[in-house]
Image: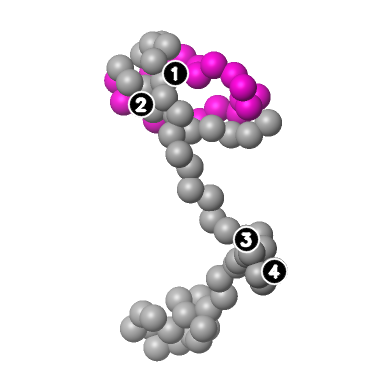
């Protein structure tokens, strides 16, 4: 079952739920309203790209994982 993100149309509360794919939106945990809308979630790509290469990002330089883009001097 996937995890979905929701926002309540009544009070604005944002929450997540583990639900079957074709389920009705849940009630809001803050106000109880049945007016939640499903949000679009952005997921970091760690899979494969269309050309078969890894979608994970690796640092180009530097020892701190910043890729040498900051002024840390690593």
Residue denoted by label 3? 46
Label 2, residues with CA under 10 Å away: few <14, some 14-19, many ≥20: some
Against 15, is 28 above or below?
A: above
Label 4, residues with CA under 10 Å away: few <14, some 14-19, many ≥20: few
Marks 1/2: CA distance?
8 Å
Marks 2/4: CA distance?
39 Å
Screen quadrant of the C terminus: bottom left
Q: Which label lies toward us, 2 or 4?
A: 4
Secondary structure type for disc 4: loop
Disc on the earlier residue, 2 or 4: 2
Residue denoted by label 1? 29
Disc on the earlier residue, 1 or 2: 2
Disc on the earlier residue, 2 or 3: 2
Q: Is residue 10 magenta?
A: no
Marks 4/1: CA distance?
42 Å
Residue denoted by label 4? 52
């Amino acid at each position: 079952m996937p995890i979905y993100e929701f926002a309540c149309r009544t009070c604005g509360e944002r929450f997540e739920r583990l639900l079957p794919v074709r389920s009705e939106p849940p009630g809001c945990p803050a106000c109880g309203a049945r007016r939640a809308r499903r949000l679009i979630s952005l997921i970091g790509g760690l899979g494969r790209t269309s050309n078969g290469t890894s979608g994970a990002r690796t640092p180009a330089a530097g020892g701190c994982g910043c890729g040498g883009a900051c002024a840390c001097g690593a």
